[in-house]
Each structure stands twice: as structure tokens, then as C-alpha cells.
Image (spheres, grey):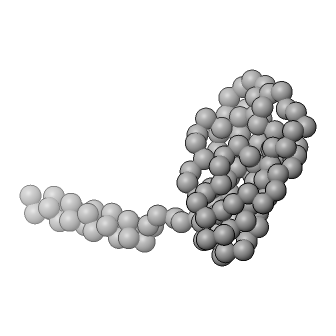
Amino acid sequence: MIRLRAAALTLGCTAAALTLTMGTAQAAPGDTSTICSSSLTPGGYVDVQWWNSAGCGSGFNPNTKKIMQLTGYPVGTVVNACASTWPPAGWTIVSSYYSAGCNYSAVPSLEKNSWQLKRVS
């Protein structure tokens, strides 16, 4: 019984130590991630590129997107983003334009599908 209790205590302490050292990773401004289009773009991020990938299914629609973290950029920063998600709070649309990397439809057009965003607050 004492051995069992000692083993449980050791295991518990080890798990607690790992939890404290690992923590949760925070994305820095400008960090990018790749996600399937079936996942919503998280708050503070914008879509910056779309393409078709077998890893996210099949079909003709672009099903994979690269997202970029905007939280933490200083006021005055300007970035380019796909018009497939609204800009986060504190960002405004400065201009719009066409980008081949932002075609998020199976039938892409040459219409403006991208924005230049500016951090205003």
C-alpha cells in the first residue's frame, strides 16, 4: 500500500511538473498556421492563402487555408489578407485587390478577393 501511494505521488508530481513546463503556446504576430477550410478561422487571425490539399478531403473547392495571427501588431501596421474572413477588431480595410492565392471558390473570378488591412487601434 505504501509503495502504491509513493508511486502515485511520484507520478502526480511528474505530471504537474510537465504541465508547468509545457504550458500553452501563444502565437506571435505574423505567425502562420495551416488548417482545413472546414475549420473556422480563429479570432485574431485572417486567411492569407487558399489551395486544394488531399489532407483536407477531396473535390474541386479549395479546402486548405493558411491563417496569420494579427494580435499584437502595433498601430500603423499594414498587412495583406484574403477577403474570406472579416478583419479582427482594431483593423480596417485600406484597399481591395485581386490575388490568385486567395481564390476560395471552385469557380474563381478575377473580382477583388483580397484586402490590405491597417491596424488602427
Percent x, y of residue 62:
76, 34
Percent x, y of residue 81:
75, 54
Q: Residue furthest left?
A: 1
Q: Is residue 59 left or right of residue 33?
A: right
Q: Quadrant of the N terminus?
A: bottom left
Residue at the (81%, 39%) spot, across then down: 103
Front in this rendered view, residue 50 or 12? 50
Residue 78 image-quadrant placement: bottom right
Residue 26 image-quadrant placement: bottom right
Res. 111 in view:
yes
Front in this rendered view, residue 65 or 89? 89
Res. 51 in view:
no
Front in this rendered view, residue 97 or 10? 97
Q: Is residue 69 left or right of residue 113?
A: left
Residue at the (78%, 53%) spot, across then down: 115
Q: Quadrant of the C terminus?
A: bottom right
Residue at the (82%, 56%) spot, across then down: 95
Front in this rendered view, residue 58 or 16? 58
Residue at the (90%, 37%) spot, across then down: 110
Residue 37 sits above or below residue 89 on the image = above
Residue 44 sits above or below residue 97 on the image = below
Percent x, y of residue 56:
67, 34
Q: Residue furthest right?
A: 110
Percent x, y of residue 57:
68, 29
- Count numbered badges in the picture: 0
Residue 105 sits above or below residue 66 on the image = above
